[in-house]
Amino acid sequence: MKKMVVFNWKMNPGSKNEAKRLAEAVREAKKNSNFKVVICPPFVYLENLIKEFKEIEFGAQNCFWEEKGSFTGEISCKMLKNLGARFVILGHSERRRYFKETNEEIAKKTMSVIENKLIPIFCIGETLEERKKNLTKKVLKNQLLSSLKEVFNLKFKNFRLIVAYEPIWAIGIGRTCKVEDALETICYLKKILLDFLPLSSLLFFYGGSINSKNIFLFLKEKEIDGVLVGRASLKEKEIISMLS
Ligand code: PEP
């Protein structure tokens, strides 16, 4: 199976034309790439990009768990599915931090994503403080178990769950986790999840300051199925180097 590179554009770029330019760079770079590429743009660009860039897969950066109704400002999984999106990033540390998303809310979103036959990119990670206190494993286990309980109980198991290990101290500041540390953590997460889900349902990603210089160090590892890329996914040169 091809390794995956997921671009999380966050609240960027500032215009539809810039979004198109970046997607064009991805389309060009993808022609010579062995990786499967997914772009997660802001909601407002999703429909146009999906229509125009058929050779690229797309995802959303968030969703709401209800299908429709009086939930001002929210977007449902059904709406995303109808547009042609395939993935949804959930539980990103920025959503946990700035929008106070809880494990319980992320649990409801995850269920809705799976029930709508979309693929969750379920993010977890520890803060630097937690890492220094040696709490990494405890924090991650709690994030996993408290948000995935219902998923474990699903009768059908023919869904995909992407677990993205994103140490918060490595996001957005250019400090990457050592590959061996990411691997150790991913193996730990896999061991926990295999008690509940078949290996065929699971993929494991790393995210945090990935760029053209370090992407291959992570993707060459058998245990790492893909990477989540933030800042570097907004620079054309980086896009080309990362996918080549
Ligand atoms: C992210 O926010 O998911 C991320 C990985 O960001 P960056 O690559 O900028 O660290």
Image (cartoon, rainbow, N blue to C red):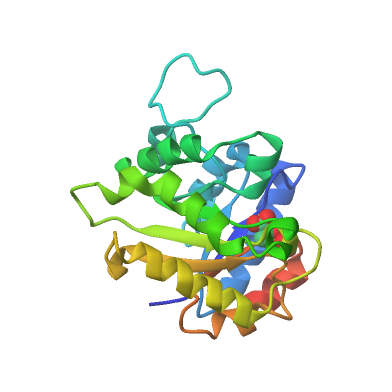
Residue 131 image position (x, y, % from top left): 69, 63
Residue 70 image position (x, y, % from top left): 47, 13
69 or 36, which lies in front? 69
Q: Residue pushed farthest left?
A: 155
Number of marks in picture: 0
Residue 86 image position (x, y, % from top left): 42, 51
Q: Residue at x 69, y 73 (%)?
A: 177
Q: Residue at x 59, y 36 (%)?
A: 101
Would residue 42 be found to the left or right of residue 194 on screen? right
> Is residue 201 something one can see in this rendering?
yes
Would residue 48 be found to the left or right of residue 187 on screen? right
206 or 149, which lies in front? 149
Would residue 193 be found to the left or right of residue 16 on screen? left
Would residue 194 be found to the left or right of residue 59 on screen? left
Where is 190 relative to 9, above or below? Answer: below
Where is 134 relative to 44, above or below? Answer: below
> Is residue 231 something one can see in this rendering?
no
Where is 168 relative to 14, above or below? Answer: below
Q: Quadrant of ligand 1?
A: bottom right
On the image, which quarter does residue 69 sit in? top left
